[in-house]
Image (cartoon, grey):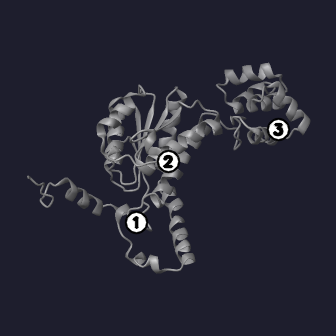
Amino acid sequence: MATTDTSGAGNPVRDLRADLTSLATEARRSDLSGIDRMATEDIVRTMNAEDATVAPAVRAVSGAVAAAVDAVAARMASGGRLVYVGAGTAGRLGVLDASECPPTFNSDPEQVIGLIAGGPAAIDSAVEGAEDDERAAAADLDALDLTPEDTVVGVSASGRTPYTVAAVAHAARRGALTVGVSSNPGSPLGAAAAHAIEVDTGPELLAGSTRLKAGTAQKLVLNTLSTVAMIRLGKTYGNLMVDVRSSNEKLRARAHRIVEMATGAGDDEVRQALSASGGDVKTAILTILGRVDAAEAARLLGACGGRLREAVEAAAPGG
């Protein structure tokens, strides 16, 4: 029976091992080689100290993040979608961020989308070989009918995941805006993207376990991309979530409190404004601040593209 030589140059496994050796996220911390012998509280404190390095690492690339946000928001303002693409932990974080946008900003579920290598089954279970499937990356994006108004954000700790790099390259060929989020500077993902966000988080507490610092950095970056883009799209009024969807008792109570904080009105006035506006927070706020009825408030919001700040200014005398 013929056998496969796994020792010579050009062997995929050997080449991959050499590739991993060059990645900071795969390096082993020799000073932590005895971590399994440490007291539990000492391990917890050590891990916490490692986690504390992530926010400064993200801050170091804040300029790149801001540039990406402005580009993303401009596309979304023209009707484009924000599409996260990744495998494993990175893919799950994209799906998580996308799923939280509708309840937070009352956005259309199709406005922010998370794609994970291997499909929905990969969210809670490993799908063998999915991260290496470059053809699937193109097919998954084609299923969305990608347009030049869309943005594709590839997320990969190594910056070398074949599925993710192929997705970003395919999106670029389709004319979409592309962003690459990784934890290894100078990565193929960064090179393939129009905007490279490369957060140098260094070696992990457990060598190669990029769900730790690298995953935390990805969560922070994705939080920032979607949140600041939504702020730019007028989904907030100051730091208030005025587009919150009141789908349960907690959110209805939050809606009441948001109107109260935005206007300084008392309980009765807030309750009446929310009732007249059908529970819509923006409309309720505008009826109070602009001293207009709900129908006029809705008209003004429509004329201002849903931007409450502009609508309030338009409702003011001489506005």
Q: Residue at x 31, y 48 (%)?
A: 188
Looking at the rendered structure, the kind of residue marked 1 is Pro
- Give the label, 1 or 3, closer to the camera: 1
Q: Neighbour class for label 2 at 10 Å: few (<14), some, many (≥20)? A: many
In which quadrant is the C terminus drawn?
top right
Q: Nearer the N terminus, badge 1 or badge 3?
A: 1
Q: Neighbour class for label 1 at 10 Å: few (<14), some, many (≥20)? A: many
- In the drawing, what numbered circle is on residue 34? none
- In the drawing, what numbered circle is on residue 203? 1
- The x and y percentages for residue 150 are 45, 31
What's the CA distance linking mark 1 and mark 3?
Answer: 48 Å
Which residue is label 3 attached to? 263
Q: Residue at x 50, y 68 (%)?
A: 50
Horizontally, is 71 left or right of 12 in the view? right
- The x and y percentages for residue 114 are 48, 39
**Disc 2 secondary structure class:** helix
In terms of depth relative to the viewer, which is nearer, 226 or 162?
A: 162
Horizontally, is 299 left or right of 178 in the view? right
What's the CA distance linking mark 1 and mark 2?
Answer: 20 Å
Q: Is residue 13 above or below residue 34?
A: above
Which residue is label 2 attached to? 93
- The x and y percentages for residue 231 are 62, 39
Q: Residue furthest left?
A: 1
Q: Nearer the N terminus, badge 1 or badge 2?
A: 2
Q: Is residue 249 above or below residue 52?
A: above
Q: Residue at x 80, y 37 (%)?
A: 259
